[in-house]
Image (cartoon, rainbow, N blue to C red):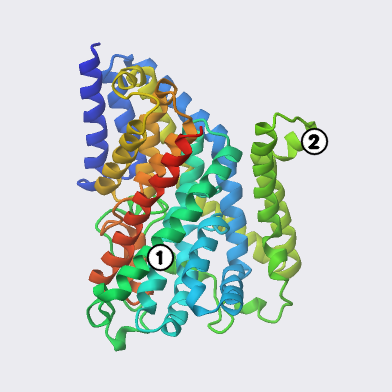
Amino acid sequence: MSDTAILVNTAVAILAIVLLIVRFKLNPLIALVLGSCYLGLAAGLGVEGTIETAATGFGDVLAEIGLLIAFGVLMGSLLSDMGAIRRLVDGLLRTLGAQRLPHAMALTIATFLQSIFLDVLLVISAPLARAVAPRLGRYGTARMATALAIGLECGIVFTVPGVAALALAGLLGVSLGTYLVYGLIVVIPTVAISISIMSAVLTRGWWKPELDEQEPAGVTATAEAEPVTTSTTSAAGGSGHAGTGTAGSAADTADSADTDGAAGRPAEAADRPQPPLLLLFTPLIAALVLVASGAVTETLEWSNPVVAFLSTPMVALLIGLVGTCLIGRRFMGQPKVEEALESGLRQSGQILLLSGVGGSLAATIDAIGLGDILGQYLSAGSWAPLLVVWAIAAVLHIAVGSVTISAITAAGLLAPVASSLGLEPVLIALAAGAGSLFMVHLTSNTFWLLQSLMGQTTRGTLKTCSVGVSLASVVAMGPILALSLFL
C-alpha cells in the first residue's frame, strides 16, 4: 500500500474515533478498538493479522503497566479513606499560611498525591480549598480554583503514578524511573510558573466576583445541590480519568466515604487514634524513592542486584501498597481496608482497559509502517518534532475532551515514530502529556466538578480551569524543550 493511502487511512481512523466518542457518545474503549480494527483491515493486515496485532499490543501494554496502575490506585484509595489529604492541607495551611497555600497545595497535589483517583482527590480537596479561599481576600476563590485545576491536571500526565503518566511511559517504552525524574523536572516549574501568571492576571481586573462566582445563596451549594452534567458520555468524561465518569459518580464516592463534616474522615473512625501524617505517606514516598533510585543507578551505570530488584517499579509500588495496607489495618481496621481496596479496584478497571486498547492502536500503527513514513517528514535534532507531538495531543484533547484519552491516543499514534525521530522517548511522552492538557473545556468532568465544588459560574470556570490549564500546557513545553538540548 502506498504511503499516501496509509496516511489517509490513519487520518480516517483517528477522525472516526473522535466522532464515535463525541458525536455518537460511544464508549471510548469500544471506539478505540473499532479504530484499530479499521486501520488494520484498511491497511492490508488482513483479519487474522489485525486481530493478532491488536491483541498483542493490548497484552504488551497491560503487562508493562497494568499492575502499576492497580497498585497506585489502591494506595490512593487507602490514603483517601484515612483522611490523609485533609490533614496534609491543614498542615500546609498552618506551616505556610493562607497566601502561600495555592502554590503549596497545587505542587503537593501534582507531585505526591497522584496515586489518589482524580475525582476522589478533587471532591475531597475542593471543599478544603473553598473554605480557605476567603482568607486570601477578594480573589481567593479564583486563586484556589486555578491552583486545584493546574495541580490536578498536570499531575496526572507528568507524575508517576498518575494514570496518564503510566500510560504514556508504557506506550512509549520509557522506564518509570526515568519518567518520574524528568516528569518532576517538568511539573514543578510548570505548576509554579502557571499559577503565578494566572494569579497576576486574575487579581488585576480579569476576575470579577460578581460575575465569575455564584450568588451568595449558592456559596454553600455542593454537587448534590446542583447536579452536574456533561456533554459527553461518562466514559469519556473525566478530563483526568477517562471512564471514571461524571460528577455524580465522584459525589457518590464522597458520600460513600460517610465522612463527618468536622473531621473529614470516616465517622466510624472518628474515635480511633490518628497516625502521624508522615507515617501515612511514608510507604508511597518510599516507593517513589525506590523507583527514582533505579533511574539514578542506571544513569551512573552502577549495578547492585538488591537495588535493582527493589527499584523495579512493580516491586517498589507493591512495597508501598503493602505498607499502606498495614498502616490502614492498624488505624482503620481490616474491614475498612477491604472496603477501600474494593473501591480502588472498581476505579482502576476502565483505566486498565483504556490503556490496553491504546496499546492496540499503537501496535496497529506500528505494523502498517506509519512510523517510518512520519519519520521522513519530522526532522530529528530540532524542536519541531516535539511541537508537532504537542499539537497532535492538543487537537485530540480539544476534540475528545479527556486528558487521559487524548494522551493515550497521541502516544499510540506517535510510539512507532519515536525511534525514527532521534529523540529520547521520554521527551515525546512528556510533550504528548503537555499537549493533552490544552483547553480543558465544557466536555470535561473536571470542569463541572470545579464549577460546582468551588462555587464558580461557567464564565469563572472557563477562566480558572480552561485558561489556567491551557497556560500550563504551553508553559510545560519550556522545560521539555530545554531538556531536549541535553538528552
Relative to residue 442, is residue 289 drawn left or right? Answer: right
Residue at left offset 31%, top offset 35%: 388
Instruction: Say which element carries label 2.
Output: helix
323 versus 222 height, above or below: above
Nearest to the observer: residue 224 or residue 286? 286
Which image quarter: residue 209? bottom left
The residue most toward the bottom is 217
How many numbered callouts?
2
Nearest to the observer: residue 130 or residue 193? 193
Residue at left offset 44%, top offset 28%: 423
Nearest to the observer: residue 231 or residue 365? 365
Name the residue that disc number 2 marks: 306
Of marks 2 and 1, which one's residue comes earlier in the chain? 1
Nearest to the observer: residue 358 or residue 484? 484
Residue at left offset 51%, top offset 50%: 162
Real-space CA distance between mark 2 and mark 1, rounded to the nearest whole angstrom: 43 Å
Name the residue that disc number 1 marks: 196
Q: Amino acid at mark 2?
A: Val
Instruction: Say which element carries label 1.
Output: helix
Q: Which numbered circle lies on residue 99?
A: none
51 versus 304 height, above or below: above
Viewer-side label of 2, 1: 1
The percent coordinates of residue 238 (x first, y second) are: 37, 55
Crowding at dot 2, Cα within 10 Å, few <14 / some 14-19 / many 20+, comes out as few
The percent coordinates of residue 91 (x first, y second) are: 61, 75
Relative to residue 106, is residue 303 drawn left or right? Answer: right
The percent coordinates of residue 18 (x first, y second) are: 25, 41
Q: Amino acid at mark 1?
A: Ser
Q: Is residue 354 visible?
A: no
